Amino acid sequence: MAINTKHKTTGWEEKSARGTAPIDNQEFWNRRAKEYSEYAAWTGYPEAFIRIMRPRDSWTVLDMGCGGGTIAIPLARKVRSITAVDFSSRMLDIVRQRCADGGIRNIRTIQGRWEDDSETLGSGPYDVAIASRSLITDDAKGCILKLGKTARKAVYISTVVGSGPFDRKLLEATGRELTVGPDYIHYYNLLYEMGIMANVRFILEVHRSEWRSYEEAFEDQEWMFRGGMSEEERHKVHAYLREHLTRVGGQWRLPYSRRCYWAVMWWMT
């Protein structure tokens, strides 16, 4: 596919720069790595993403922003090999441990960021490049171009729809304004401006509202507060959880779940 690398700015890039993007902080993700990886594995999202891919056993795959192996681990038995890249060393530790536990030998891990050059991110090219929920960057166009250059057959990306997995009720109770970065329509329009006619499918992910301990429940809210919670917000979150959490079957549970949609966009290269 011919890609327009010189498209004029349409306002979408500025929107991305002005908006509140997901946290791109190595320390944060190192701290949350185990919890996030365990949680992401059971939501049904990985299986749905892989069904959309329809993988071939001959494929070589680049998984950019692999996290704890949310896609790479279940995909590994369906393709020839995977290069899993993430900027969090702890996430990569989890990938390697999951490979050891599952007897998976066709995944290699590389610590790197979107900004790194191709040599740092592995030799390539690959048959397929994926970026599952990992376009955490101000230079979306540059990242898309990088994926396209390294993929011989296809590129698959996924981004959030609307406000995503944020707990609106809790944020309203604390007085914190909900500000989210651009959703899938930003990326779809960017792809269109680049001359890429992407396919789109949506995945529904139902987020749990239960935890093994009160401390775990509280800590699981921290990611929603950009820049961290103020002391007043911490008090309000504690008050909200004490009011709404109930003990059910050994778990602490909120009386509602959160529904989140993800858009998977893909195109042939």
Image: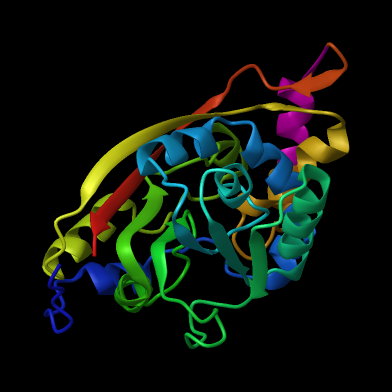
Q: Residue at x 35, y 46 (%)?
A: 264
Residues in magenta, as a range? 237-248
Dividing the image into 4 quarters, which one contains the C terminus? bottom left
Q: Tell me the chief SS of the magenta region.
A: helix
Q: Nearer the viewer, residue 58 or 213?
A: 58
Task: Name the residue rendered at 41%, 46% in the picture.
Answer: 56
Residue lying at the far top in this picture: please name it.
249
Is 115 magenta? The answer is no
Q: Quadrant of residue 250?
A: top right
| Colouring rule applied to residues | rainbow
Residue 224 point in image, percent of width and height: 60, 50
Give how far across and how far down residue 225 sits, in percent: 62, 55
* Vertical position of residue 250 compared to residue 121: above or below: above
- Residue 197 vs residue 41: left or right? left
Choose top left, top right, bottom left or bottom right for residue 58. bottom left
Residue sticking out furthest to the front = 58
With respect to residue 121, does 258 lie above or below?
Answer: above
Q: Is residue 240 magenta?
A: yes
